[in-house]
Image: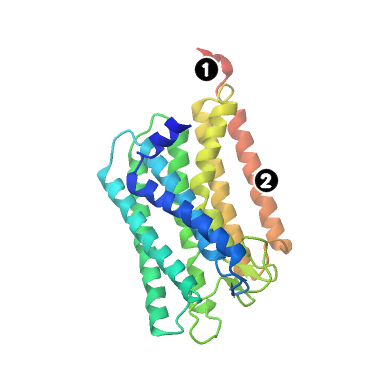
Amino acid sequence: MTTALRRAGHWHRPLMVFVAAMAVLAVVSAIGVVTDPRVLTGVPIWLKPLKFSVSFVLYGITLAWMLSLLPRRSRIAERAATVVVAMGVVEMMIIVGQVLRGTASHYNETSPLNAVLWQLMGAAIMVLFAAHVVIGIVVVRQPMADRAARYATGLGLGLTLLGMLVALPMVLPGQDPGVEGIAGAHSVGVADGGPGLPLVGWSTTGGDLRIGHFVGMHALQALPLLAILLRRFAGTRLDPRTQARLLLVAGAAYGGLTLLVTAQALRGQPLLRPDALTVTAAAALVAATVAAAGLVVIRRRPAVELVA
């Protein structure tokens, strides 16, 4: 374990330092959730930095791991990852700073200072998005001997971009809640801060655009994890080409799920109370995924050919 941690520390030093800092912040925020009685938009005021710090831990460590898989070192990708770290620091400083001031960080334009901080966050996210695109292009263009790993990393990075993009409706004019000084909202059909699911806070009375954002962002972990599980538990039964094709099917299904829950939110539906149209679309997605995966497995190379 010590050796593994020491090796991980050398993946991408700025990213790993950032991950360590976010892990510490997650602990501090968790303590704040329990000990600080302040509530903002219906949830403990420290819940937002807790969720963001945990998310950055997962994002940063996965990104560093993916960079370590590249057969050739890429200074462009490493510099882009350093930009990701810088923008993450900017975002978290604003989020924590606003918590300390007792006010909201997102959509907050209730004063000139709050408006500048919100606009700075938006600019940081745009730069982070661009840096992520650069990393994705570098990873996809570099050859990897393991095709399944290449698909998992490429699709994970691409679907994470989709997760960032589906968050855009939160700040579009259609999401203007009509409250002075508030420039967006994550809930659809209801006001932000209403009843929500435990911990994540997703609305239980209306749509919530954070769901699609969450699902898409964590493709970066889900697809590489699937590739690892396939290699570990099905490596002797499924040839590398079949594993890679299954990753393609999983990536398409994951993208479909991200779009489905985003569309559900835009229609003002709570995640756990879908209407007939959403249920039908979900059933169609499951059926198509199972059929495609079954077809891939049926057409896999025979075991005799693999042994030969």
- Disc 1 marks which amino acid? Leu
Q: Which residue is mark 1?
A: 306
Residue at label 2?
287
Furthest residue to the left? 75
Please state if 239 lies on the left or on the right of 277 as rendered: left
Residue 139 x/y as whole percent: 36, 42
Which element is circle 2 on? helix
Spatial CA span between label 1 and label 2: 30 Å
Residue 176 seen in render: yes
- Front in this rendered view, residue 290 or 49: 49
Q: Position of residue 16 (x, y in %)?
A: 39, 46
Q: As displayed, is residue 220 above or below residue 193?
A: above
> Which residue occupies the extreme top position in the image?
308
Q: Earlier in the sequence, mark 1 or mark 2?
A: 2
| Residue 164 at x, y percent in the picture | 46, 60
Residue at x 38%, y 81% (from the top left corner): 113
Residue lying at 52% horizontally and 33% vertically, measured from the top left: 228
Task: Name the residue: 67% across, 67% down.
Answer: 196
Three-letter code, disc 2: Ala
Numbered disc 1: secondary structure: helix
Residue 17 vs 185, above or below: the answer is: above
| Label 1 neighbour load within 10 Å: few <14, some 14-19, many 20+ | few
Whether the residues at callouts 1 and 2 have beta carbons within 8 Å, the answer is no
| Residue placed most toward the observer, 116 or 266 | 116
41 to 306, vertically: above or below: below
For residue 39, the mark is none
